[in-house]
Image: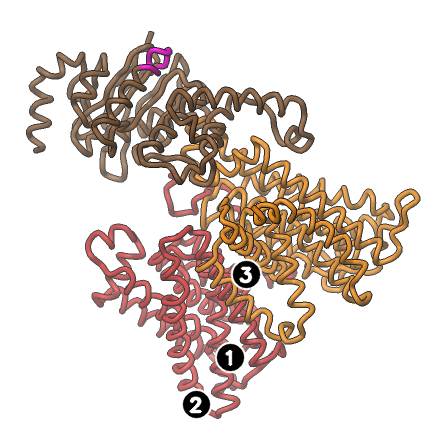
């Protein structure tokens, strides 16, 4: 089953075509990689799929729903979550509060519940705390739950960003350069974590610069260069694709 | 450990102090000043919801204060309605107006939002000032009846009214505290911190900001209604930019986004400017500089400074 | 006919003031992304300084105007260095609040020095001249010409000098200007000086034909914001043309439709524009 299907998607910034007529798909239950030289349009493509940026041309379908014109929070509610390239967390909150924000879309209590402290609010809070503690456990941050998020190390922040996304219980998780800025050791444990998440039934699509990470994790890979898709296939096919070699070597 | 204890006891001490304060002020004048300070504190708490919790610089809130004040004043003087209906009417009307204005203004971001809301505030002010057949223009509304009595409790004395306003202030703090401690408040702070991240996990940032705007407009309306009922006369200056800037000053001095900061800020700034005659002449010179210095060196206000001293930053 | 001509002249006079203030506002917004809520208060200071020099010190009106512009221009530099530059890389809300602080401060200082009393000064050109058979106050015509000279000088500076080109580049694209190596801090300071001087010039020019009082700048600032938003934040032609257009609309609307709500026009238009286009008229929605 196809979870994401983007057809002829383009994004123009003024005269620059950051993404140019790309067809792109993610099959449910897989780990898909997006690679390409710097400035190839990978993050822009992510931003289009997650609706962080408006699409100039083309159509994006998520799980059978046309999401091309939806707002970011609407497509998130359909079951899409993401992390950002420059790791983003809520700096002014504690670790557990960060994760609770991720969980918020699964609760219903509103202003009146908050003012009257209704039973619904209290029940949802209890459930939410239990659920996000499990998520924090999963990413290895349970010990840090009560700490202010801004006190975390770079690697812990990456885990927290992942926990925020996971707390929303997404069906599709977009990861923008999960291994950037962390050590090789940490990368290995991060790969293991991503594999565990995938094994738990979450479809994953990631942008990654480290080839060995992509080749090891992904079942399918899409290669972008100058905003265009230049190749698509299994890791083996990509390894042998002359256009890919050319794009990478040509840029060096 | 003692510091933690002080921090724990602080709200109770503050409440006790504010309950005792009206009894120990030297004369009727100071009682009036104190009560007005409580009213401005409600206004500041309201402004803090949109500015501190949601991170949006709204300059329309003096407009809501004016609308609330005039709603109460006109209902009481023209329709002969009781204060106990006029005040809720002000809150309801300001909530509705806040919802509508918020829905429109919040589509603009950052500087544009500030300028847009400033224009809206001025429109409220000018309409109040010019719509003479309804508001009596510059003359204003005079002879607004007070709260009278509610059941067996009479609010004829200044002291009783002072406690009425204090009760409203405590209620305001309770509302903002409950809101802040709930998932709703957490979401609001998250959207302030990082809109894109909040939206990426399904938070409707626009709805969140609109809710904050509505609540803060409702509180501005409550403060306005109390002002009308307490002072007894009302002019269009109630909705002016001066009111807006003063309220802003109270919030910033106290500490943006801190729960009780706006109350402290109001008591300090309004109290000092009323009580110290030296300050009375120079107070805006000093407060103008203070605002600039605070934003530069102490952006979290008094509350932030206290929190830093106690070593438990929020 | 005479009424219409008079009203058009009045509109152009007010328009000169609006444009001069709006030009500074738009340049400051463009080069440093600060909505300077205190800008009209620089205009107020210009009016007071000219008044003081002429009425108290007996200075020549034009000397007074020039000195007022220089003094307020200098104040602009001080404001930039002490207030806005240190806040440039913090939350955008901070510089807005600081601008409000400056506004409160300047108004309070004016109240202390000159009290809240309305001041009035005589123009050296108090007579009436007849143009095409219609009588006009001489000072109004001179104001029009002087404002045109100031705007002309600004345009020449912006288009014919290197520094002017750098300011324009910065106003149009702050990040781009930084990338090509323009010293944006220096541009900001220069822009603040020029903008403050223009506002002060407007104040000095208008002082003989209107009343001078501490809060005279508030409404002018607000209208200048309306103009700048409508004309495009950072756009020089927008501010120039917009100022005259708004003033004409106000004066004619006030004469022929309703004088009561004259001051509302700008804000209603501004609100309508933002309602339809939340990011202003001349910016693409993000």
Residue at 27% from the left image edge and 40% from the top image edge: A14
Q: Chain of mark 3?
A: C
Chain A image colour: brown
Question: What colour has chain C?
Answer: red
First along the sequence among labels 3 and 2: 2
Q: Is residue C167 left or right of residue A248?
A: right
Chain B on-screen colour: orange
| Residue to which mark 3 is pinned | C250
- Which structural element holds mark 1? helix
Residue located beneath label 2 in the image: C60
Query: In the picture, which quadrant includes the N terminus of chain A?
Result: top left
Observer-nearest of B273 and C61: B273
Residue C98 in the magenta stretch? The answer is no
Q: Residue B119: in sight, yes or no?
A: no
The x, y position of residue B60, in whole percent, is: 59, 51
Vertical side of B50 occupied by B156: above or below: below
The answer for how far apart the CA atoms under marks 1 and 2 are is 15 Å
Cα distance, mark 3 to mark 2? 33 Å
* Chain of the residue on which disc 2 is drawn: C
The residue stretch that appears in magenta: A196-202
Question: What residue do we see at 44% from left, 52% from top?
Answer: C230
């Amino acid at each position: 089953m196809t979870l994401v299907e983007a057809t002829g998607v383009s994004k123009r910034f003024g005269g620059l075509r950051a993404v140019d007529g790309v067809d792109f798909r993610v099959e449910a239950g897989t780990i898909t990689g997006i690679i390409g030289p710097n400035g190839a349009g990978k993050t822009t493509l992510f931003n289009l799929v997650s609706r962080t940026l408006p699409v100039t041309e083309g159509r994006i379908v998520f799980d059978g729903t046309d999401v091309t014109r939806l707002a970011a929070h609407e497509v998130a509610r359909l079951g899409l979550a993401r992390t950002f390239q420059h790791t983003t967390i809520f700096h002014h909150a504690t670790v557990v509060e960060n994760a609770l924000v991720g969980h918020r879309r699964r609760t219903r209590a509103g202003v009146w519940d908050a003012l009257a402290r209704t039973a619904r609010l209290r029940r949802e809070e209890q459930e939410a705390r239990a659920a996000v503690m499990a998520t924090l456990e999963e990413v290895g941050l349970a010990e840090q739950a009560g700490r202010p998020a801004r006190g975390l190390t770079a690697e812990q922040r990456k885990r927290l960003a992942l926990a925020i996304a996971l707390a929303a219980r997404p069906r599709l998780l977009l990861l923008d350069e999960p291994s950037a800025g962390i050590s090789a050791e940490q990368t290995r444990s991060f790969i293991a974590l991503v594999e565990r998440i995938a094994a738990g039934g979450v479809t994953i699509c990631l942008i990654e610069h480290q080839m060995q990470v992509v080749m090891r994790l992904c079942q399918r890979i899409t290669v972008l260069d100058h905003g265009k898709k230049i190749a698509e296939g299994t890791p083996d096919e990509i390894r042998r694709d002359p256009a890919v070699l050319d794009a990478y070597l040509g840029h060096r | 450990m003692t510091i933690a204890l002080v921090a724990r006891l602080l709200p109770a001490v503050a409440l006790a102090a504010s309950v005792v304060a009206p009894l120990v002020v030297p004369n009727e004048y100071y009682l009036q000043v104190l009560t007005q300070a409580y009213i401005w504190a409600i206004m500041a708490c309201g402004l803090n919801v949109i500015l501190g919790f949601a991170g949006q610089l709204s300059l329309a809130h003096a407009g809501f204060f004016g609308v609330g004040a005039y709603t109460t004043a006109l209902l009481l003087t023209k329709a002969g309605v009781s204060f106990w209906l006029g005040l809720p009417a002000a809150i309801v009307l300001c909530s509705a107006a806040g919802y509508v204005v918020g829905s429109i203004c919040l589509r603009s971001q950052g500087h544009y939002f500030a300028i847009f809301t400033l224009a809206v505030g001025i429109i409220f002010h000018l309409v109040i000032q010019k719509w003479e057949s309804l508001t009596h223009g510059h003359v204003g509304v005079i002879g607004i009846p007070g709260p009278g009595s509610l059941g067996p409790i009479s609010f004829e004395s200044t002291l009783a009214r002072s406690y009425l306003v204090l009760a409203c202030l405590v209620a305001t703090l309770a509302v903002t505290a409950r809101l802040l401690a709930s998932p709703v408040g957490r979401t609001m702070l998250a959207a302030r911190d990082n809109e894109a991240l909040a939206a990426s996990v399904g938070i409707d940032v626009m709805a969140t900001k609109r809710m904050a705007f509505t609540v803060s407009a409702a509180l501005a309306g409550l403060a306005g209604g109390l002002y009308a009922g307490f002072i007894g006369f009302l002019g269009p200056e109630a909705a002016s930019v001066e009111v807006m800037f003063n309220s802003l000053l109270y919030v910033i001095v106290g500490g943006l986004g801190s729960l009780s900061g706006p109350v402290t800020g109001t008591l300090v700034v309004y109290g000092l400017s009323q009580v110290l005659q030296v300050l009375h002449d120079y107070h805006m010179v000093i407060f103008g500089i203070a605002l600039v210095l605070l934003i530069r060196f102490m952006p979290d206000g008094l509350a932030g400074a206290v929190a830093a001293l106690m070593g438990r930053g929020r | 006919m005479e009424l219409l001509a008079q009203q058009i002249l009045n509109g152009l006079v007010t328009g000169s003031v609006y444009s001069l203030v709006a030009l500074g506002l738009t340049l400051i917004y463009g080069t440093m992304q600060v909505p300077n809520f205190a800008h009209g208060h620089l205009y107020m200071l210009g009016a007071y300084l000219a008044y003081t020099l002429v009425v108290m010190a007996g200075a020549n009106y034009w000397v007074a105007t020039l000195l007022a512009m220089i003094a307020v221009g200098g104040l602009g530099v001080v404001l930039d260095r002490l207030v806005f530059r240190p806040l440039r890389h913090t939350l955008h809300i901070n510089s807005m609040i600081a601008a409000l602080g400056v506004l409160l401060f300047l108004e309070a200082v004016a109240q202390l020095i000159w009290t809240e009393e309305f001041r009035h000064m005589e123009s050296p050109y108090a007579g009436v001249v007849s143009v095409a058979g219609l009588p006009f106050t001489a000072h109004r015509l001179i104001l029009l010409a002087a404002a045109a000279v100031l705007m002309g000088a600004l345009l020449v500076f912006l288009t014919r000098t290197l520094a002017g080109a750098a300011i324009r580049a910065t106003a149009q694209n702050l990040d781009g200007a930084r990338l090509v190596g323009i010293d944006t801090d220096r541009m900001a300071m220069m822009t603040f000086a020029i903008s403050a001087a223009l506002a002060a010039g407007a104040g000095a020019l208008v002082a003989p034909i209107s009343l001078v009082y501490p809060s005279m700048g508030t409404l002018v600032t607000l209208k200048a914001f309306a103009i700048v938003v409508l004309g495009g934040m950072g756009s020089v032609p927008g501010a120039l043309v917009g100022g005259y257009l708004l003033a004409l609309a106000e004066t004619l609307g006030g004469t022929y439709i309703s004088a009561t709500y004259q001051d509302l026009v700008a804000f209603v238009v501004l609100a309508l524009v933002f309602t339809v286009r939340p990011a202003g008229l001349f910016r693409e929605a993000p």
